[in-house]
Image (cartoon, rainbow, N blue to C red):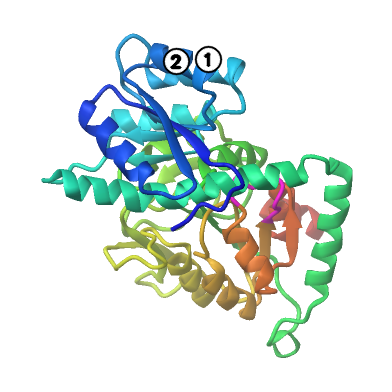
Amino acid sequence: MTVQNSKPLKVLVVDDTVVYRKIVTDVLTDLPGVEVVGTANNGKIALSKIFSLKPDLLTLDIEMPVMNGLELLARMRKEAPDVGAIMLSTLTQRGGEMTMKALELGAFDFVPKPQNDTAEENRKAIKDAIFPMIRAYTRKKEIAKILGGTSALSSTREDKKKAHLLSGAKKPDQTLRGRREKSEIVAIGISTGGPNALAEMMPRLSGDLGVPILIVQHMPPVFTKSLASSLNSRCALEVKEAINGEQIRANIAFIAPGGKQMKIVAGADGRQRVIRITDDPPENSCKPSADFLFRSVAEHYVGRATGVIMTGMGSDGTKGLELMSRNGATVIAQDEKTSVVYGMPKEAVDAGIVDVIAPLHRIADEIRKTIKHPVADNRLNEL
């Protein structure tokens, strides 16, 4: 795995634990294109080294003495806004809550601290998780330079042009299927940069939206519950971590539990739809997987669904969206400029299955255009 960059990505390793400083330093040293410029055991020392060593990125522990990771991120936001951070987070409820706050303060992503029996197992776990994040962060910096001179107006015009071309492309079975109906469900797939993207998009949706929302955010156990709690405090819609067997209801956003798969199945009466949480294997190295959810939505809501693919690494979601698209769903993708990582949306766009490409601040509006809103429909019927 090689990070393609003209200059080495300079990284400062910050952790109060000697073991993790050693593990992370060794992992990053093995990655071509990355230079570990130093280490620090608390935020105060790290802040001074940011000014002297000028790193591009920090790997950052949250709970540290003197100045913790959240306090350091707050200072960085004001004094070193161009320096990124990847958090090392503990798999606990407190760790999940603090990680959500870290992401709100501008952290790029997080790596759960492994708790394996041996240092070698922990090293491998961190290596497998952090390598793609380093590549994605490097790519983000490169794209930011390229797009830096592009005005918001020209970007929007280009997005509209792309969306127009895509929406004009006939889907494989469109002539047989006929006109789409208004959506009765919204399914969202999202990964790196997702918590902040959802925190901006979801509050733009009204509490009487009229349809349920199902969300797959790539996260480990515990963290999805913290994400749901954080979003619920911001949104007019109810946001909750999904529970196995519960009925899908309008005006509720259900987030797939970390480390599990989520799909839709028919209820006992054959009419209602319920959530099934399973321990099926990962897909695209993801558990939960957007593809896993999207396939079930395609099956149970033919011609009556909206699929949304947002910021994230990799290609999870594309195959499921292809099936949704063939079954008459409307597909919305986040644009490149507002995506923290333009991986998942790009794969869907390149596959030719996207109807609308929109910047983050417009995605809620695009969702509203596709859905069946009972209040609005009743008013129209009264006219």
Q: Residue furthest left?
A: 117
The stretch drawn in magenta includes residue 306: no
Marks 2/1 in contact by CB < 8 Å: the verdict is: yes
Q: Does residue 259 appear to the left or right of 56 in the view shown?
A: left
- Does dot 2 land on a helix, a strand or a loop? helix
- Does dot 1 land on a helix, a strand or a loop? helix
Residue type of the residue flagged with mark 2 = Glu
Characterize the local packing of mark 2: few (<14), some (14-19) or many (20 or more) Cα atoms within 10 angstroms: some
Q: Is residue 272 above or below residue 205?
A: below
Q: Quadrant of the C terminus?
A: bottom right
Looking at the image, which is closer to me, 357 or 33? 33
Q: Position of residue 50 (x, y in %)?
A: 50, 20
Q: Position of residue 361 (x, y in %)?
A: 72, 42
Q: Does residue 52 appear to the left or right of 170 in the view shown?
A: left
Q: Which mark is residue 71?
A: 2
The residue depicted at 60 percent of the width and 16 percent of the height is 78
Q: Which residues are magenta?
A: 334-341
Q: Residue furthest top?
A: 66
Residue type of the residue flagged with mark 1 = Arg
Looking at the image, which is closer to me, 81 or 201? 81
- In the picture of the structure, the residue carrying the numbered disc 1 is 75
Q: Position of residue 310 (x, y in %)?
A: 60, 53
Characterize the local packing of mark 1: few (<14), some (14-19) or many (20 or more) Cα atoms within 10 angstroms: some
Q: Position of residue 119 (x, y in %)?
A: 16, 43
Image quarter of residue 346? bottom right
Q: Quadrant of the N terminus?
A: bottom left
Q: Is residue 168 above or below residue 345?
A: below
The residue depicted at 61 percent of the width and 79 percent of the height is 327
